[in-house]
Image (spheres, helix red, strand yellow):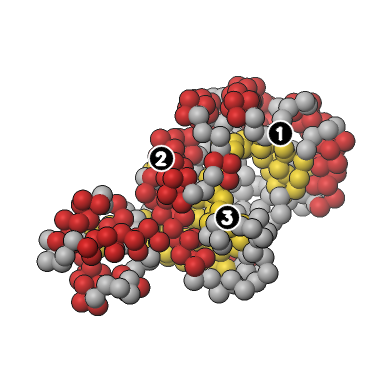
Amino acid sequence: MTKTILFNLSDAELEKFITDMGQPKFRAKQIREWLNRGVPDFAQMKNIPEKLRLQLAENAKTLPVEIIKKLESADGETTKFLLGLGDGEQIECVLMRTTYGNSVCVSSQAGCAMGCKFCASTLLGLKRNLTANEIFAQILVAQWELRTDKFADKPIRPNGDANNGDVSHIVIMGTGEPLQNTENVIDFIERANSQMGIGWRRITLSTCGIVPGIDRLIEWGRPINLAISLHAPTDELRSQIMPINNRYKLNEVLDAAWRFTDNHNRQLMIEYILLGKRDENGETVLFNATPEYAEKLSNLLQGKNCMVNLIPWNAVDERDFAAPSGNAVHRFQDILIKNGIHTRIRRERGTDIGSACGQLRLNNAKR
């Protein structure tokens, strides 16, 4: 029997569902309050009679996602969730506890069609877009985790956090390309802002460069942060590792991105994964992380309002790349900084739990 997902029901539909069970209307409001908090099961609805809780468990589910697996980093700062959807598909989201708040990285699709050569997310292909409810439910999973957090006493809570220890930042940077699911993503962001009070400037959307999607964000007009997965400073190099570059060239992507950021006076984030290759002797040689490419990237971004986020590659067994050395990473950064480009190296989080995009889903599928 397919169970009804109560979170997906409107208030009127939920009320009817409850009254059809012979219950008073006010129970629907109580249940909605629990759903909005991200309750994972009916057993934890403490102000609902036990008999009703058991009835609900037989006929319904709370959220459109359920936790299949949860991994916690040893330092307590990162929690990764493998989530199951109603049709059997799986997605990932990651909760990161930081000094500036609690950030959640959400997926926008089950799988990915972009085919980037360095990424785990695309290896299983694209299954489907996520609904706005399925994206929003990832935030609720993280919110519930924070409110029952065994790491709550760790001294990493930010001072003056307006969200009082709840989710304060969102990055749409997990599995999938958000701008292939633009309308559902926009719906999700609007709800995160209106229902959870997460400010526009605390929400970041990452895209590999779907130009019509960026234009839709411009039309939408909300001042969120935009990140472009660039990963190469030339069309020739980018096309080798990112097939989307055959559709939308570097200059087209960046021109659309500058239009977006100019509208909102926002700094554009440029994401750049640093890659190496193995030579015939098994030694790592630089691929897109050479000093020459650092100079080319500097020239591409000179004078622009942007920040480059350098990302050392997270190893994926099925991919023919290698991580460059720490010295190579810092040399690349030094060249950008010398040329006046604001640059930082992304701090690696949750490496002990394989928290890079798509890794948990891929490993679970292989098992």
Label 1: few (<14), some (14–19) or many (≥20) C-alpha neighbours in 10 Å: some
Residue at mark 3 to residue at mark 1: CA–CA distance: 27 Å
Q: Which amino acid, by three-letter code, is at mark 2?
A: Asp
Instruction: Determine which residue is flagged by label 1.
Output: 306
The residue nearer to you, when weighing 5 against 266, is 266
Q: Nearer the viewer, mark 3 or mark 1?
A: 3
The residue nearer to you, when weighing 264 against 88, is 264
Residue 354 showing in the rendered view: no
User: If you read the primary sequence from the N terminus, does the residue marked by circle 3 or circle 1 appear first?
Assistant: 3
Position of 118 relative to 47 (above/below): above
Q: Which amino acid, by three-letter code, is at mark 3?
A: Ala
Instruction: Determine which residue is flagged by label 2.
Output: 187
Q: Position of residue 296 (x, y in %)?
A: 79, 28
Residue at the farthest right position = 338
Q: Which amino acid, by three-letter code, is at mark 1?
A: Cys
From the viewer's perspective, is 362 left or right of 226?
left
Label 3: few (<14), some (14–19) or many (≥20) C-alpha neighbours in 10 Å: few
User: If you read the primary sequence from the N terminus, does the residue marked by circle 3 or circle 2 appear first?
Assistant: 3
Q: SS class of the residue under badge 3?
A: loop
Residue at mark 2 to residue at mark 1: CA–CA distance: 27 Å
From the viewer's perspective, is 336 left or right of 68?
right
Residue 69 showing in the rendered view: yes
Instruction: Determine which residue is flagged by label 3.
Output: 162
Q: Which quadrant is home to the N terminus?
A: bottom left
Residue 338, quarter of picture? top right
